[in-house]
Image (cartoon, helix red, strand yellow):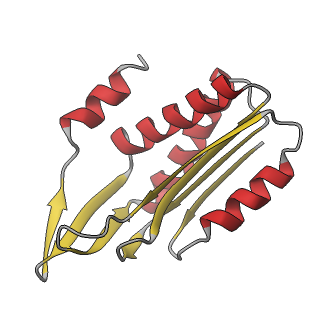
Amino acid sequence: MSDVRLITAAFDAGEEMRAFTAAHPQAGGIVSFLGQVREGGGCEALELRHYDPLTLPAMRDLAAQVRERWALDGLLVIHRSGVMLPTEPIVLVAAAARHRRDAFAAADFAMDHLKSESWFWKREKTGGEWRWIEPRTQDFEDIARWA
């Protein structure tokens, strides 16, 4: 089963992981990744925008790809949009599997695809000014390894 959510409010990653873990007691391994807004470097805020008719369906399609590729007991993908402040969560991906390697690979694949093929536009506020953030070369190299 996959739980895929696109939200605008902050979420409690600890509570989400407690609930996910409790829902999958048969899993031998649960792997999670939490992405948050970096503190420091002058970042005052981060904003993620998206095209609503495509984003959630594309996230669900990605979850289906992950589930087809690895033997998972469960998959959780939560992604925020809107304006976020430093230390606030942006994304949580968790994979539950009978064996750890499937859980690690599934979470890694999902994050690489969310980051590199994302349906989000990102901008950062520093010094009172907003600037758009483009994908990095590393993001494309990360996703290329899954081809």
| Residue beneath the point at 34% across and 39% down | 116
Horizontal placement of 14 versus 117: left or right? right
Horizontal placement of 43 versus 73: left or right? left
Give the position of the N terminus as an image quadrant.
top right
Residue 100 percent across, percent down from the top left? 69, 28
Q: How many marks?
A: 0
Q: Nearer the viewer, residue 123 or 29?
A: 29
Give the position of the C terminus as an image quadrant.
top left
| Residue beneath the point at 13% across and 83% down | 128
| Residue beneath the point at 89% across and 37% down | 26
Question: Going by the picture, which residue comes out furthest to the top?
Answer: 147
Horizontal placement of 99 versus 35: left or right? right
Figure check: 26 above or below 36: above
Figure check: 125 above or below 24: below
Residue 138 percent across, percent down from the top left? 24, 34
> Residue 87 lies in what quarter of the image?
bottom left
Residue 68 percent across, percent down from the top left? 67, 24
| Residue beneath the point at 51% across and 44% down | 58
Figure check: 78 above or below 45: above
Figure check: 102 above or below 5: above
Horizontal placement of 126 versus 68: left or right? left
Residue 81 percent across, percent down from the top left? 43, 67
